[in-house]
Image (cartoon, rainbow, N blue to C red):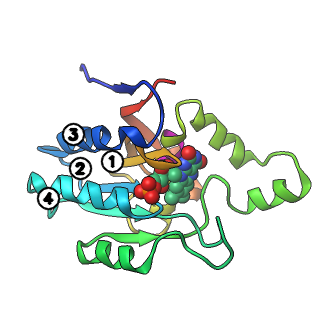
Amino acid sequence: MDKLIKYFEKPGNENTDDLINLVKERLVDSDIKYVAIASVSGETALKLFKALEDVGINDKITIVNVTHHAGFKEKNKLEISSKTRKKLEEKGIITFAGSHAFSGVGRGISNKFGGVTPVEIISETFRMFSQGIKVCGEISIMLADAGLIPVEEKILAIGGRANGADSAAIITPANMTNVFDMRIHEIIAMPID
Ligand SMILES: Cc1cc2nc3c(=O)[nH]c(=O)nc-3n(C[C@H](O)[C@H](O)[C@H](O)COP(=O)(O)O)c2cc1C
């Protein structure tokens, strides 16, 4: 089987529109039913919805969004506005906020005492591909644990470098208790740098 991977020259937000186009092309005529996206502000999730709407497949696919956990940037604050969250909900897109699977309490331990926890090693191993591919793996666990996407079924996951999207993969998610059951079947796009 031959498949094409798109390699962006540089990571980051500038690749968002191209990435969304590639995802749209990959989803048309596919049997993927769920798309997991990391969109802290919700803006990239809105762009994704519009792209799927343009080709009339938005009602066949459930998009689930993940934002940073409260307190990631500022105490007691989520980084998505209630206005954008509502706008997404009106389009059927749930936004999940919870502990990040690849840092979690372990980050609190290494922040206080130094060193590294095993889960942070998993995280850095994913980052050998790209920040975005690490995010794809991480949000697939978070959403599976929240019961918002299935395990044992291929989904499409989207992540990026701080803002926007530059990486996408087809993944069979796993719950955190069986993390090594996760399968990464295809990389659709990632930055080459
Ligand atoms: C749970 C979570 C973890 C993330 N981890 C990283 C990360 O490790 N490295 C990184 O560059 N971006 C990370 N991001 C950012 C995303 O990959 C993506 O670029 C961002 O959510 C897009 O948000 P926007 O739609 O507001 O631009 C993370 C986002 C979320 C929601």
Is there CB contact under 8 Å for labels 4 and 3? no
- Can residue 78 be seen here? The reply is yes
Which comes before the other along the chain, label 3 or label 1?
3
Q: Residue at x 44, y 64 (%)?
A: 41
Magenta residues span: 133-137
Residue extending furthest toward the front: 14
Q: Position of residue 42 (x, y in %)?
A: 39, 64
Which residue is tagged 2?
Answer: 32
Q: Nearer the viewer, mark 4 or mark 3?
A: 4
Which comes before the other along the chain, label 4 or label 3?
3
Which residue is tagged 1?
Answer: 156
Q: Nearer the viewer, mark 2 or mark 3?
A: 3
Which numbered tag is attached to residue 175?
A: none
Whole-angstrom CA distance, mark 2 to mark 3, is: 9 Å
Which residue is tagged 3?
Answer: 26
Which residue is tagged 4?
Answer: 53
